[in-house]
Amino acid sequence: QVQLVESGGGLVQPGGSLRLSCAVSGSIFSIYTMGWYRQAPGKQRELVARITSGGSTYYADSVKGRFTISRDNAKKTVYLQMNRLEPKDTAVYYCNKALDPTKFQWGQGTQVTVSS
């Protein structure tokens, strides 16, 4: 059974940075396009960034130029470096497959709060 474990969230001031990690167990990780998603209170979950098995990336307009997604296939981990954080980035962040309608079971996510 595939397990997704997100970590690295926290409370940060506007303009600060965080690095999120997502460890994937129980699956062949390297073949999948992986994505970071976020869900703010009262809003639908949205895709923030994705990375293909070959390393091609896509970013939502709202985070382009501030966030960087990367992956380490040997460690079966996907990362999200978040810089110049803004209050609107406050959400629970999740990772999962992207460009695939069949998702893994969602993990618990990691809370990111941007506030002064």
Image: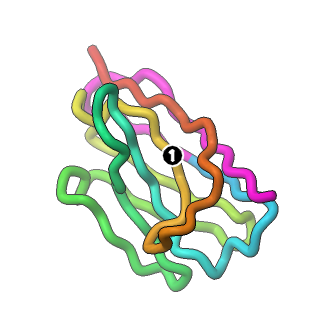
Nearest the viewer among 34 and 73 is: 34
Q: Residue at x 48, y 29 (%)?
A: 111
Q: Is residue 31 above or below residue 74?
A: below
Residue that protrudes farthest toward the bottom in the picture: 54
Helix, strand or loop at disc 1? strand
Give the image quarter of residue 13.
Answer: top left
Give the image quarter of residue 7.
Answer: top right
Q: Quadrant of the N terminus?
A: bottom right
Give the percent coordinates (x, y) of residue 11. 43, 21
Q: Residue at x 52, y 45 (%)?
A: 20
Q: Is residue 25 above or below residue 115?
A: below
Tell me the kind of residue under disc 1.
Tyr
Q: Residue at x 67, y 45 (%)?
A: 5
Inspect the magenta stretch and tell me whether residue 7 lies in it: yes
Instruction: Magenta stretch: give its range.
Output: 1-20
Q: Residue at x 74, y 52 (%)?
A: 3
Give the percent coordinates (x, y) of residue 26. 81, 62
Q: Is residue 74 above or below residue 109?
A: below
- Give the side of residue 12 with respect to residue 98, left or right: left
> Which residue corresponds to mark 1?
94
Give the percent coordinates (x, y) of residue 98. 47, 67
- Give the side of residue 27 with respect to residue 96, left or right: right
